[in-house]
Image: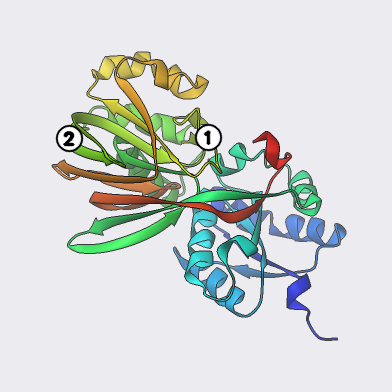
Amino acid sequence: MTFDIENNYLVIVNPNAGRRRGEKDWNKISSLLKEAGIRFKAVFTQSPRHAIYIAASHIENGYSKLIVVGGDGTMNEVVNGIFLQKRYPSSDISVGMITVGTGNDWGRMFNIPGDYAEAISTIKMNNSFIQDAGVVKYFHGRKEKSRYFVNMAGIGFDAMVVSKTNKMKEAGKGGPWIYLKNVIISLMKYRYSKTKIHIDNHEINNNVFNISIGICKFNGGGMIQLPDAVANDGFFDITIINKIKKHDIILNLKRLYNGTINKHPLVDTYRGKSVFIDSKPFILLETDGESLGHSPFTFDIIPRSIKVLVGKPPDSI
C-alpha cells in the first residue's frame, strides 16, 4: 500500500516544549491521534529553527495538512516554513495545534483546548479560520533579517523579559509564572528609549517603555496587551506604553491581565498595516515568544494568509 500524502497529516513535534512535555507525552498524544482515526507522519525537531525546514520541505513534497505539537515558538517556526515553501499558496495549508508549551497564547486566542483528546477533537472538527500574519525586518548586528509571525511582536521591555525567560527555559526552568517573575526582575534594569514610530502615514516621537504589535490578543502566558485585536481584519493592533514610573507599572500589572491596559493615561493604541520603528539606543525584538534582534524594524501585514483549525466557529472570533 502506498502512503497517501494528500490525506495524511504531518505532525511536527517539539520534544523540548513545555519542559519536555512534547517528549514525555508523545506516546499518549500519538495513541490519541490513532484512536481518532487520524493518519499521520510524525517528525521531531532537533534544534531551534528546525521546524521551519521540516515544514517547508514536507510541504514541497506534498503535505498540506499540518499539526503542531509544541508551544507558540514551534507554531511560529512552522508558519515561517509555510511562507518559505513555494508549492502551495500559504492559505491552502491547514494548521492544527496540540499545545504542550508553557505560554500557549496563540492557542488561547483560538480556544484550543489544553486537554489532548479535546485538542484532537478540535482538529477533526475542521473549523478553519484564515488569519492574518505579519512579517518584520530587523537587524542582528549589521545584518538585516526577516521573520513571519501570527500572534504578537514585543519591542523594548517585553523583548528583554522574553530573552530572560527563554534563557531560563533553556536551563530547564519554567512554569506559568516565569514570565511575570521576569517582568518584576527586569524592571530594575530596563531603561527607556527615544523612539521614532511611523504607523502608516502617522509619525510618533516619544520616550517609550514597550511596544506591542500583533494580530492576536494574548502574550506572556495570558497577558492581554492587544485587547481589541481581530485576527483577520487586515490590520495590526499596536499598544505603546510610554515612559512610566516603575512603581506605576507594578501597581497596574493587573491591567495586563484584565484587558484594560489601553485605559491607562500613558498608553496609546493604534491600528495600521505597516509600521517602522527606530530608536536611540537600539531596542530588542521578540515575535511569538522568540528572541530575535534589534531596531530599526519594519512591519507589514499579510492579510488572511494562514489557515488554522480553531476551537470555536470562525465567525465568533
Answer with the quarter of the image where residue 183 lies: top left
Label 2: few (<14), some or many (≥20) within 10 Å?
Answer: many
Q: Is residue 309 visible?
A: yes
Q: Quadrant of the N terminus?
A: bottom right
| Mark 1 or mark 2, earlier in chain | 1
Give residue 56's mark: none
Kind of residue at badge 2: Ser
Kind of residue at badge 1: Pro
Residue 296, x across and y down, in percent: 22, 50
Label 1: few (<14), some or many (≥20) within 10 Å?
Answer: some
Instruction: State the residue lying farthest toward the front.
Output: 201
Q: Is residue 261 above or below residue 137?
A: above
Left or right: 222 as drawn, with respect to 116: left
Residue at image location 27% in from the left, 50% down from the top: 297
Q: Quadrant of the C terminus?
A: top right
Q: Is residue 19 visible?
A: no
Which residue is tagged 2? 193
Mark 1 secondary-structure assignment: loop
Instruction: State the residue lying farthest toward the bottom.
Output: 1
Q: Is residue 149 above or below residue 91?
A: above
Residue at image location 59% in from the left, 71% down from the top: 88
Which residue is tagged 1? 176
Pointer 1 with pointer 2, Cβ within 8 A: no
Mark 2 secondary-structure assignment: strand
Q: Nearer the viewer, residue 73 or 298?
A: 298
Q: Nearer the viewer, residue 175 or 100?
A: 100
Residue at image location 45% in from the left, 47% down from the top: 288
Left or right: 74 as drawn, with respect to 279: right
Give the label, 1 or 2, closer to the camera: 2
Residue 52, x across and y down, in percent: 49, 66
Residue 21, x across and y down, in percent: 61, 51
Residue at image location 69% in from the left, 58% down from the top: 26
